[in-house]
Image (cartoon, rainbow, N blue to C red):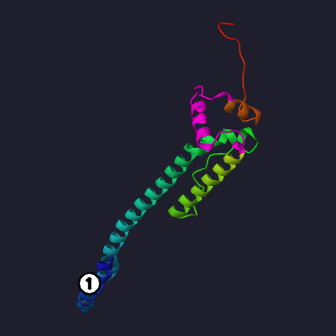
Amino acid sequence: MEDGFTDLDEQADEQRERLRLGMRKGQFSAMRELPDLLIKPILTQAAVLGGKVQGIENAISAYRTQTLEVFNRGRRRLLEPLLSAVGEGPLPPLQAGEGRGLSLHGLIVDLDLRQRQLEQRAVAVLAETGVDLERWCEIAEEMLAGREPGINDQELKALVARGILRQRISFGGDA
């Protein structure tokens, strides 16, 4: 781009001399072509730069979207049932527009802060149940996958007593 402006002075001098000669002969058509001749190389270079900037903007947008999706599929997904069970939910997934005004670093910091706040709330809910955050995440992962989690009696009683889980009793066999 800078080269286009550097060459512009030289091109302008050449065109000025050409115009002088043409105007002495009464030919003024070259005057109409002059702006296009001088500006066209700069516009071409600006279009190339615009394309590169657009590519960078698209990559940033894709990174933002991917980062929000990772957050939504991560611990937020595992903690949402826990917090909802005690009336502190639901936790709606973050939408694509959230964090638009933040830099990429700012977005990461914001999501990290949100995650820590969710984890602190979850730890407070799990207090006195004998189940720590990591254990809860294992239990929630199994339950969200539709599998029976391996919960011992003490954990089950504590989680049912806090209203976090419900215990269902059914008849055995084919009854």
Relative to 104, is 121 above or below? Answer: above
Q: Residues within 10 Å of mark 1 (few under 14, many from 20)?
A: some
Residue name at image x 56 percent, y 30 percent = 145
Q: Report helix, strand or loop for mark 1.
A: helix
Q: Is residue 89 visible?
A: no
Residue name at image x 72 percent, y 25 percent = 167
Relative to 120, is 84 above or below? Answer: above
| Amino acid type indicated by mark 1 | Gln
Q: Is residue 22 left or right of residue 125?
A: left
Magenta residue check for 117: no
Relative to 16, is 129 above or below? Answer: above
Pick whichever, 64 or 133, lies toward us. 133
Across and down, in percent, residue 104 comes to 51, 61
Residue name at image x 58 percent, y 45 percent = 75
Across and down, in percent, residue 27 comes to 27, 85
Across and down, in percent, residue 103 comes to 53, 64
Q: Is residue 46 visible?
A: yes
Residue with the mark numbered 1:
11
Image quarter of the N terminus: bottom left
Which region shows up in magenta? 125-153
Res 140 → quadrant: top right
